[in-house]
Amino acid sequence: MQSGSNSPLSGLGFAFIAFGLFATHDAIIKALGQTYSVFQIIFFAMLFAFIPMAVMMLTDQTPANFRPRHPWLVLARALLSITAMSAAFYAFVQLPLAEVYALLFATPLLITALSVPLLGETVRARRWAAVVVGLVGVIIVLRPGITVFSPGHLAALVSAMASSLATIIVRKIGKEERSAVLIVYPMLFSIILMSGTLPFVYKPVELPALGLMATVGLLSVIAQLCNITAYRFAPAAVVAPTQYSQILWATVYGAIFFAERPDTMVAIGAAIIIGSGIFIVWRESRPDVSEQSPVLKSSNPRFDAGPSPRPRGWWRRGRA
């Protein structure tokens, strides 16, 4: 295999496939959410996603690979990841897909701001300016006083904040924790916690819907593996901005399947947020600017272990 520095086009290809799959995953969630509770959807999706993970676990004969070195931070990260996922799924059900993505794209801005007190990262004027401009984009999307601030909007913002905090934790402990711990524990906790909600939200699942829930879990695993492979082939500064391609998929899926028409103000706000995020990634890619690069070195906040592991035995290692 070629090294990442020699195959940027391959890295971009895997990245675009990954985020296309993630967007497809989210569109299915929105469709299922018209009938089923997001808690029930998460339970079955994670249950199916855990099957390939269990197969990988059976190939690992070293129990220490699954023992967390920072159990309380691993637990906190798992709970934050579950909160982010649940809130995002609820937002997808309640709001147009593109609008939810516009708000979720505020995550890199929040990571940058939180990295100062929590990681000791030095953020200088240009990146702070990008954060402020990006938050202006969020305000444009929300349009306070003009449109109703709904529970869906709140859920999207909660998801962005929880994802930011979860990413900060990964950046703090990722070099010491193995990838298996960072991936498997959130999945296990999500299955356990969501099972506790089933007595209150469960509806009988028809076979086609169960198939879609299984598809959500499978897409999640495949997309994450593609994302990891993308970072193996190409530099993080090349791969990281591709996450914004999800809004294009969201616009297409929204128009075809949910009769969602693109909103001009959402498009303007999203463009500002995306521009700010790309600027932050670019600034962090410069070695003389950022010490820890919390945004650049963090991949999509969906049960990921980070961008650096290799496909074979990748989950036995911590983040680089």
Image: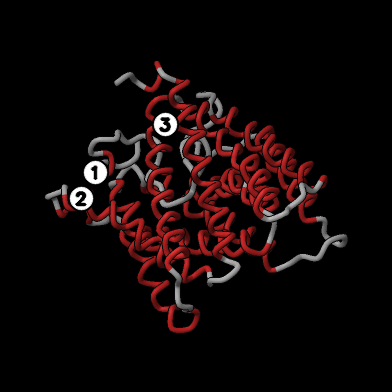
**Amino acid at dot 2:** Asn
Q: Is residue 151 left or right of residue 230?
A: right
Q: Hey, what amino acid is under mark 1?
A: Arg
Verify CB contact (< 8 Å) between mark 1 and mark 2: yes
In the picture, the disc for residue 316 is 1
| Location of mark 3 (residue) | 231
* Residue holding disc 2: 65
In the image, residue 283 sits, relative to residue 35, either above or below, namely above
Q: Judge the density around disc 1: few (<14), some (14-19), many (≥20) Cα neighbours within 10 Å.
A: some
Q: Residues within 10 Å of mark 3 (few under 14, many from 20)?
A: many
Residue at 43% across, 54% down: 215
Left or right of 143: which side holds 243?
A: left
Q: Residue furthest bottom?
A: 199
Q: Which of the two residues, 267 or 237, is positioned nearer the viewer here? A: 267
Mark toward the start of the polypeptide (3 vs 1): 3
Who's the residue at 47% across and 61% down the image?
80
Q: How is the image coloured?
A: secondary structure
Q: Is residue 50 above or below residue 277?
A: below
